[in-house]
């Protein structure tokens, strides 16, 4: 019998004071809740991750780089606008969210940061097509602000430019950080490599849709936002070598999971390896009942109630174990969301091949 799931099946009560408004003093100064393969919970500190990984395990990171995607400005008529660049199409063209009292029309211009004009050329669904006068990334770096999540109540400050970015970020294009990676510093990465853990990278440019709630009664009716991903040949080969050695593929963050599993779905992979590199747009929506092809464990942060990310980890670990883990995290006063604490989730014994 098929169970019809609703967003309410992924709800939980979260005291507002557990939403982390600022990062920990240092990247590794956070807690780590382990949900092991038997369903048992263990309260740890983030540096303890070294003891959870084995020689030969492969950590797969999302190397996207958060761009300074938020710009304030006004229409030439005087009305205020806020622009959030969602996707860079080429050197001067983007798709963006625009907040304004009245949506700007095609052909109109917006003055941004009191420094330059962009032209509205049309719409694609909820997004506006904009043309910038020169290189987008240069203008964003000079005049834009880091786009902190909506549940962080302060405007981006200078320390956010560094801390809302992973130490290995290199491919600009995200408007939200792959937050599980925020806990790593160079010293931890070096320590893990010294003990025989291997590193690999994918790219998935995280969009603002990652924060959007599911607004349908049945999950079957939800349409995921689109995100661009790349899985390079080097990572394909690293996964194959890991499988051959009998070690584990550990995704760092739900965005790494979506990139890997999207590549597997696009290739029709069934052998827990990828036949080749992959690139494209993904709308993969992972919910309970999904059969994971690539990952064996997952490092992640704590996610919003009723969010697609909470649905993803519930698909991986099981709905009841995640409910128990989140109830424990609330009771133990873990810090939640982007600047919060982390979870290490191992595939349940019942799902292992």
Image (spheres, rainbow, N blue to C red):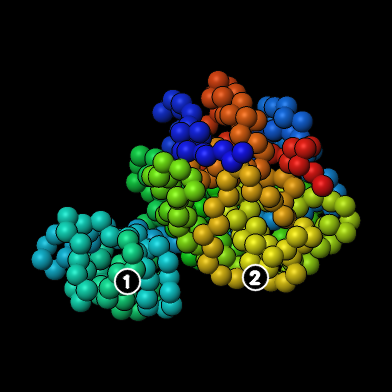
Distance from the alpha carbon under mark 1 to that under mark 2: 26 Å
Along the line of sight, which residue is nearer the eye, 129 or 64?
A: 129
| Residue lying farthest to the top in this orientation | 331
- Vertical arrangement, residue 84 with respect to residue 182, above or below: below
Residue on which disc 2 sits: 278
Measured as percent of width and height from the top left, residue 61 is found at 65, 56
Mark 1 neighbour class, 10 Å CA radius: few under 14, some 14 to 19, many 20 or more: many
- Vertical arrangement, residue 86 with respect to residue 53, above or below: below
Would residue 243 be found to the left or right of residue 221 on screen?
right
Would residue 184 be found to the left or right of residue 75 on screen?
right
Residue on which disc 1 sits: 129
The tag on residue 235 is none
The residue under the point 33% across, 64% down is 125
Measured as percent of width and height from the top left, residue 332 is found at 58, 22
Along the line of sight, which residue is nearer the eye, 113 or 97?
A: 97
The residue under the point 38% across, 44% down is 215
Would residue 17 be found to the left or right of residue 196 on screen?
left
| Residue lying farthest to the right in this orientation | 245
The residue under the point 67% across, 38% down is 317
Measured as percent of width and height from the top left, residue 206 is found at 50, 57
- Vertical arrangement, residue 195 with respect to residue 108, above or below: above
The residue under the point 57% across, 45% down is 287
Residue 26, can we see it? Answer: no
| Residue lying farthest to the front in this orientation | 1
Choose the circle earlier in sequence order: 1 or 2: 1
């Amino acid at each position: 019998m098929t169970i019809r799931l609703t967003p309410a099946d992924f709800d939980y009560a979260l005291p507002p004071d557990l939403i982390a408004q600022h990062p920990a003093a240092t990247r590794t100064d956070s807690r780590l809740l382990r949900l092991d393969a038997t369903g048992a919970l263990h309260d740890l500190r983030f540096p303890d991750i070294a003891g959870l990984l084995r020689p030969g395990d492969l950590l797969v990171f999302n190397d996207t780089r958060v761009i300074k995607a938020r710009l304030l400005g006004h229409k030439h008529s005087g009305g205020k606008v806020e622009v959030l660049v969602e996707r860079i199409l080429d050197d001067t063209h983007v798709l963006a969210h625009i907040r304004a009292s009245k949506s700007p029309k095609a052909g109109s211009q917006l003055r941004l940061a009191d420094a330059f004009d962009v032209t509205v050329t049309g719409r694609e669904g909820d997004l506006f097509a904009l043309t910038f006068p020169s290189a987008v990334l240069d203008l964003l770096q000079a005049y834009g602000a880091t786009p902190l999540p909506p549940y962080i109540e302060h405007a981006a400050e200078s320390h956010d430019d560094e801390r809302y970015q992973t130490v290995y970020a290199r491919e600009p294009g995200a408007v939200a950080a792959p937050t599980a990676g925020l806990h790593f510093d160079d010293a931890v990465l070096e320590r893990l490599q010294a003990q025989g853990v291997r590193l690999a990278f994918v790219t998935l440019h995280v969009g603002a849709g990652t924060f959007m709630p599911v607004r349908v009664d049945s999950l079957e009716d939800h349409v995921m936002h689109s995100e661009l991903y790349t899985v390079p040949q080097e990572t394909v080969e690293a996964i194959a070598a890991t499988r051959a050695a009998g070690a584990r593929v550990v995704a760092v963050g739900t965005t790494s999971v979506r990139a890997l599993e999207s590549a597997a779905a696009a290739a029709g992979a069934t052998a827990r390896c990828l036949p080749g590199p992959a690139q494209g747009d993904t709308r993969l929506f992972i919910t309970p009942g999904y059969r994971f092809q690539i990952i064996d464990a997952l490092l992640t942060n704590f996610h919003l109630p009723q969010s697609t990310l909470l649905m993803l980890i519930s698909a991986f670990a099981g709905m009841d174990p995640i409910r128990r883990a989140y109830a424990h995290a609330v009771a133990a006063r873990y810090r939640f969301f982007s600047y919060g604490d982390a979870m290490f989730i191992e595939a349940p014994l019942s799902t292992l091949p």
